[in-house]
Amino acid sequence: MNRSKFFRKLALKRFSIDSKELKVIASVPSTFIRDRMISNGYTSQIESKLKEISGYNIKVELTIDNN
């Protein structure tokens, strides 16, 4: 799969901050894409890059966009 097409469907839904956790919530078009991102380590890579850039542990949560 072409990675540029793969990530083109990724959309940031919101960034939340509470007293316990920093979190980025992104939508993907299907459970297949979500599962592939997790199993291929893409969410971990995104979390690592966010930590490198910000200095904070930021969790990435993927939701399914049903539109």
Image (tube, rainbow, N blue to C red):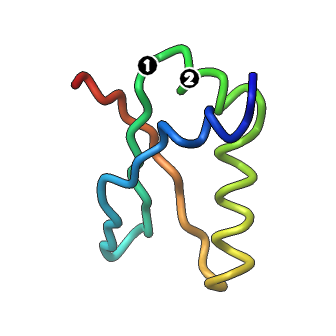
Q: Is residue 66 left or right of residue 27?
A: left
* Label 2 crowd bin: few (<14), some (14–19), many (20+), radius 10 Å: some
Residue 65 locus on image (x, y percent): 30, 29
Q: Is residue 64 left or right of residue 3?
A: left
State if disc 1 and disc 2 touch (CB < 8 Å): yes
- Report which quarter residue 53 is drawn in: bottom right
Residue 64 locus on image (x, y percent): 35, 27
User: Is residue 40 depicted above or below 14 in this figure?
Assistant: above
- Report which quarter residue 50 is drawn in: bottom right
- Under mark 2, the amino acid is Ile
Q: Is residue 23 left or right of residue 35?
A: left
* Label 1 crowd bin: few (<14), some (14–19), many (20+), radius 10 Å: some
Q: Quadrant of the N terminus?
A: top right
Which residue in the protein does label 2 denote?
Answer: 33
User: Is residue 2 depicted above or below 17 in this figure?
Assistant: above
- Under mark 1, the amino acid is Ser
Between 7 and 47, the one lying in front of the other is 7
Residue lying farthest to the left in this orientation: 67
Residue lying farthest to the top in this orientation: 32
Residue 25 locus on image (x, y percent): 39, 51
- Secondary structure at badge 2 equals helix
Q: Is residue 18 left or right of residue 33?
A: left
- Residue under the image location 30 percent in, 72 percent down: 18
- Report which quarter residue 20 is drawn in: bottom left
Which residue in the protein does label 1 denote?
Answer: 30
Q: Quadrant of the C terminus?
A: top left
